[in-house]
Image: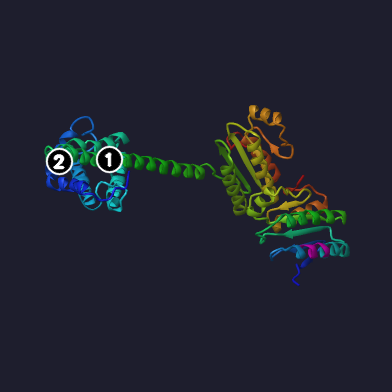
């Protein structure tokens, strides 16, 4: 079964979704990620979905679930690189991903994570209400 | 139009046309010297060419199909009527004048038909009837052609307006502005949303300012559309600021009970720009001597 790799970068975890997400893959990612966070005591999770072109409500909810679970495990989640079409779809589905932080690209996302972990004021990126 | 079979009577229309083409043309030109002539718009030679072409095509078509305008034999005639309606429209003719141009063929044609069937009242009436039906159909066809042209123009302009109305402007490295002018409906919002999000990706902008100074009214639907755009931009990692909120619009939004608390709103584009710069950590200072560029 295919698996989404989770890379450890310092105190952060990097997840790049490069295949079509289906529900079982999403559930597996959720399991792996929570396990990794508690193992590595990561402070932040960065999920890159720039190659993701199709989403449904399940994937949308999964993203927001992962953010919620990470927060409980004391790690910030940033979703980066969402395509316009994906953003429009999620909004039309009524999923505004509350509690998920977003950034334009991996660079901006890493900056955001670093700032929030350091506790210094962020220059960009924001928390969704 | 009744699809009448080709009857011996109606074949005679083509015979009349063939036999007296020159005479009919001359009388037709004379007939038009009155009110419909409009010599200010079309030259004599052009008009004569148009008339003789109409007569020629009419002769050809009536030979095989009689006075049945719906028949495929009239295809070339219809093409030419389309062309005449288009060119006359450009020349400044009114649609009624174009139709009258065709109707003015009636007197010379009827005169010839009458002369041809000298004394035979029944045949004359039948012939006149089919000729008048044909010319009426042709006249109405030009009216329809004009209307179709107008509708095409309107549709094209609507599409152009849709494209024109959504410019995304880059204000600074990382700051986009989207001035919206005119009423926001669902179709426009879709275009606005897509072009803004696309521009955010392309220019890698972290802040987008939606300026609604040019939006006359905000109702619940418009507000909903705005909120959707703001949320979509946020999902992509860009901040949205709504600027140009006029006092009446602020009142309407509150009265409608729309929650804009999560969205940064500013009264002017300048104020929104200042916030955007602040978010990017860019500051300007006024130079000590006053001849420099004044920034705040």
Question: Looking at the picture, how far across and down is residue A3, in whole percent?
Answer: 76, 69
The answer to whether tags 2 and 1 share a subunit is yes
Q: From the image, tell me which residue sits under label 2.
A: B24
Instruction: Count up the numbered dots.
Output: 2
How packed is label 2: few (under 14 Cα within 10 Å), some, or many (20 or more)? many
Report the front residue among B228 and A127. B228
Q: Quadrant of the N terminus of chain B?
A: top left
Question: Looking at the picture, how far across and down is residue B208, in whole percent?
Answer: 64, 44
Say which chain tag 1 marks: B
State the residue at coordinates (27%, 48%).
B77
State the residue at coordinates (30%, 41%).
B137
How packed is label 1: few (under 14 Cα within 10 Å), some, or many (20 or more)? some
Alpha carbons under labels 2 and 1: distance apart: 18 Å
Could you say whether the residue bearing mark 2 is in a helix, strand or loop?
helix
Examine the image and state in which quarter residue B246 appears. top right
Examine the image and state in which quarter residue B151 appears. top left
Say which chain tag 2 marks: B
| Residue B296 visible within the image | no
Q: Which residues are magenta?
A: A26-31
Examine the image and state in which quarter residue B294 appears. top right
In front of the other: label 2 or label 1?
1
| Residue A71 visible within the image | yes
Name the image colouring. Answer: rainbow
- Tell me, yes or no, whether the highlighted magenta stretch contains residue A80: no
Are the residues flagged by discs 2 and 1 in contact, CB closer than 8 Å? no
Q: From the image, tell me which residue sits under label 1.
A: B133
């Amino acid at each position: 079964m295919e698996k989404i790799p989770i890379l450890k970068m310092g105190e952060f975890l990097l997840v790049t979704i490069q295949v079509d997400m289906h529900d079982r893959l999403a559930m597996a990612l959720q399991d792996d990620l929570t396990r990794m966070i508690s193992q590595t005591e990561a402070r932040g999770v960065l999920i890159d979905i720039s190659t993701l072109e199709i989403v449904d409500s399940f994937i949308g909810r999964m993203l927001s679930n992962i953010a919620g679970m990470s927060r409980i495990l004391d790690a910030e989640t940033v979703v980066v690189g969402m395509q316009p079409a994906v953003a429009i779809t999620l909004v039309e589905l009524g999923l505004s991903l509350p509690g998920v932080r977003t950034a334009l690209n991996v660079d901006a996302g890493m900056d955001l994570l670093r700032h929030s972990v350091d506790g210094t004021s962020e220059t960009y990126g924001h928390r969704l209400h | 139009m009744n699809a009448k079979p080709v009857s011996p009577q109606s074949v005679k229309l083509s015979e009349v046309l063939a036999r007296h083409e020159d005479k009919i043309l001359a009388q037709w030109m004379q007939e038009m010297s009155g009110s419909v002539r409009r010599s200010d718009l079309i030259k004599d030679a052009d008009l004569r060419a148009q008339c003789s072409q109409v007569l020629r095509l009419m002769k050809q078509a009536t030979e095989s199909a009689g006075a049945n305008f719906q028949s495929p034999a009239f295809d070339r005639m219809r093409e030419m009527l389309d062309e005449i309606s288009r060119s006359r429209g450009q020349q400044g003719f009114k649609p009624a004048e174009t139709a009258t141009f065709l109707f003015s063929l009636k007197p010379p044609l009827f005169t010839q038909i009458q002369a041809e069937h000298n004394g035979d009242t029944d045949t004359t009436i039948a012939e006149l009837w089919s000729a008048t039906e044909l010319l009426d159909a042709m006249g109405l066809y030009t009216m329809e052609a004009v209307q179709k042209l107008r509708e095409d123009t309107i549709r094209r302009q609507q599409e152009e307006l849709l494209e024109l109305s959504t410019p995304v402007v880059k204000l600074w490295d990382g700051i986009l502005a989207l001035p919206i002018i005119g009423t926001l409906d669902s179709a426009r919002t879709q275009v606005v949303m897509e072009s803004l999000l696309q521009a955010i990706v392309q220019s890698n902008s972290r802040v987008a300012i939606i300026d609604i100074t040019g939006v006359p009214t905000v109702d619940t639907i418009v507000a909903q559309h705005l909120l959707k755009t703001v949320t979509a931009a946020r999902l992509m990692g860009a901040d949205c600021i709504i600027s140009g909120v006029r006092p009446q619009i602020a009142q309407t939004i509150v009265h409608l009970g729309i929650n804009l608390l999560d969205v940064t709103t500013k009264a002017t584009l300048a104020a929104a720009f200042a916030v955007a710069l602040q978010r990017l950590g860019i500051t300007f200072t006024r130079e000590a001597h006053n001849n420099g560029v004044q920034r705040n």
